[in-house]
Each structure stands twice: as C-alpha cells, then as structure tokens.
Image: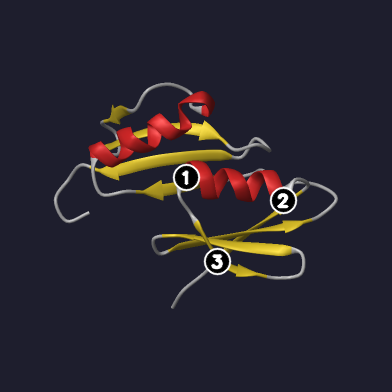
Amino acid sequence: MDGIVFFRTERPEAVVEFYRERVGADVWLEQPDCTILQAGAFRFGFCERETAETEGILTFVVDSRDTVDSMYESLEAVADGAPRYNDRYDIYQFFGEDPEGRTVEVQCFEHEGA
C-alpha cells in the first residue's frame, strides 16, 4: 500500500520550487491545482487553496550522516541549527522551515536495521 500526504498552500510555486530545488524531490504528478512530489518512497502534495496548512512535520529519512550533512548544506539558510545527534530517538537530525513555515526534518537512524 502506498500513500500521499496533502497540504493546502497559498504559494504553490514557491513551495514546490523549495522542495524540488532544496530538498531534491521530483514532481510525481501534476493535477489542475495540486502538485504531488516524490522523494524516495515519500509522496507529498501541495494544493492551492485560500489558506495554508502548516501543521505537522515533513520528515525526510536518509541513509547516512553524510546525506544529512549534505542536505543541511542545501537547507542551512532555513535550518534551526547544525545537524545533531538525538539520543532519545537514536537519530542524527536537523529541522528547518519551508517558505510557508512548515517544519521540515532531515534525519537518519543510527541503529542497525533502520
């Protein structure tokens, strides 16, 4: 089973460009007022509406600390700080914000089998 998470957006062009250019997502499907993006197996869409939906966190799970660090370089201007180890969840991560203020997280799991 697959899935897609959708968000309302007031700024579809800026938001889609952010995820394509800075996160590395690809357009999976264009619809009349929605764009569905894909990053690995993660699909998420943005639909133009009168108000933006900014709750939740878009978490991008990558395979290594090196990839987290590389993505941080692309997102440093919108990040809350450098990547760091979170011992509670055994992950290496950082957070940032997209153009409408949605929280974006990039992380990798540190334990075997993740």
Q: Which mark is residue 4?
A: 3
Q: Quadrant of residue 110?
A: top left
Q: Residue furthest bottom?
A: 1
Q: Nearer the viewer, residue 64 or 58?
A: 64
Badge 3 marks a residue whose secondary structure is loop
Label total for image: 3
> From the viewer's perspective, is the residue at label 2 or at label 3 nearer?
2
Badge 1 marks a residue whose secondary structure is helix
In the image, residue 86 sits, relative to residue 39, either above or below, namely: above
Q: Position of residue 100 (x, y in %)?
A: 68, 38
Q: Nearer the viewer, residue 99 or 52?
A: 99
Identify which amino acid the numbered label 1 is placed on.
Val
| Real-space CA distance between mark 2 and mark 3, rounded to the nearest whole angstrom | 17 Å
Q: Residue furthest top?
A: 81
- Mark nearer the N terminus (2 vs 3): 3
In the image, residue 3 sits, relative to residue 110, either above or below, namely: below
* Residue 81 appears left or right of 70: right
Identify which amino acid the numbered label 2 is placed on.
Pro
Q: Nearer the viewer, residue 61 or 72?
A: 72
